[in-house]
Amino acid sequence: MKLNKTLLAASIAAGFTLAAGSAFANDNLADIMQQGDLNTANQFQDGNVNVADIEQIGSGSAASFNNSATQDQVGDDNTANIQQNSDASGLFTGAVTSFNTATQDQMGDDNDAMIEQNSSAQGIFSGALTTLNTAEQTQTGDANIASITQVSDAGWFSSDVTFGNTATQEQVGDWNNAMATQSGYGNVSEQYQEGDSNVSTVMQDGVDNTAYVSQYGDGNTATVTQEGYYHLATLTQTGTGNTGSISQYQSSNTATMVQTGNNNTGTQVQY
């Protein structure tokens, strides 16, 4: 019965996509596949040669849960991809992924966005989780790249959890690149880019870490790495060609870096 429901949802989605494509644009490609719980998927493309893909899976007796995914593309040659997975497979199964929500919004041309909220397991006593997921990406301009991954893996006598992480990324301008990778519990990542050719990367592995990155200008590079517990990092760049890096390890560190002007370089490491 679940399979029939899934196929029906896919058919309706495919039919809607085809109708929207013929009414508004040319050569757009959309694909929806839903298997798992309370799925909802929404895709809108207004422009030409856009590609959108939503998969909300959960296979075996793995889950994926309260899925919802929305993709919105206005412009040409944009690519968006949402996968809210779970996998498991054998030896005490496992994997979950849970209260997923993912939203992507792209206006302009040649933008590329990807959200994955995983889990996996694959065997030896399984495990893995990745709950309370939320991810959101907004790109306004051309040739921007945004990527969010909220992982979990397990196997080999299990564990690996990843719980309650939130990632938000917003880009205004052209050729910006933002990436967030989160593992652990209660991590928050917020990245904002305004200008052109900025690069921002946040990597979080631990518990209750928070990272805020704001870039105003062109050609700035920001990197925040957090491992451990209760870290807070704020990195703000205003100008051109600035490079800033904050690395936090162990627990309860607070770092603030503000770069104003051009071609500044800053590094902070906390243990």
Image (cartoon, rainbow, N blue to C red):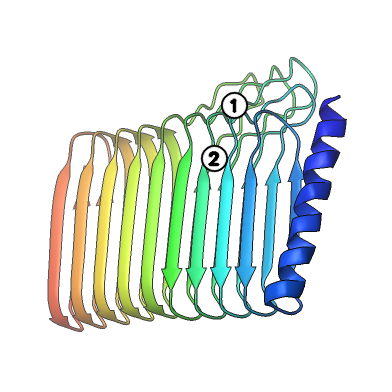
Viewer-side residue, 197 vs 157 = 197
Question: Disc 2 on helix, strand or loop?
Answer: loop
Residue 161 tag number = none
**Is residue 210 among what the camera can see?**
yes
Residue at image x 25%, y 53%?
212
Placement of 194 over or under 268, stated as above or below: below
Q: Which quadrant of the view contains residue 86? A: top right
Residue at image x 39%, y 81%?
197
Going from N to C along the chain, the mark reached first, 2 or 1, is 1
Read off the residue under disc 2: 151
Say what amino acid the circle numbered 2 marks: Val
State the image coordinates of residue 206 (x, y, percent, origin top left). Answer: 37, 34
Placement of 35 over or under 25, stated as above or below: above
State the image coordinates of residue 230 (x, y, percent, origin top left). Answer: 24, 34
Read off the residue under disc 1: 128
Label 1 packing within 10 angstroms: few (<14), some (14-19), many (20+): many
Q: In 3D space, how far apart are the residues under numbered discs 2 and 1 (Cα atoms)?
A: 9 Å
Viewer-side residue, 196 vs 33 = 33
Left or right, 146 with respect to 21, comes to left
Say what amino acid the circle numbered 1 marks: Ala
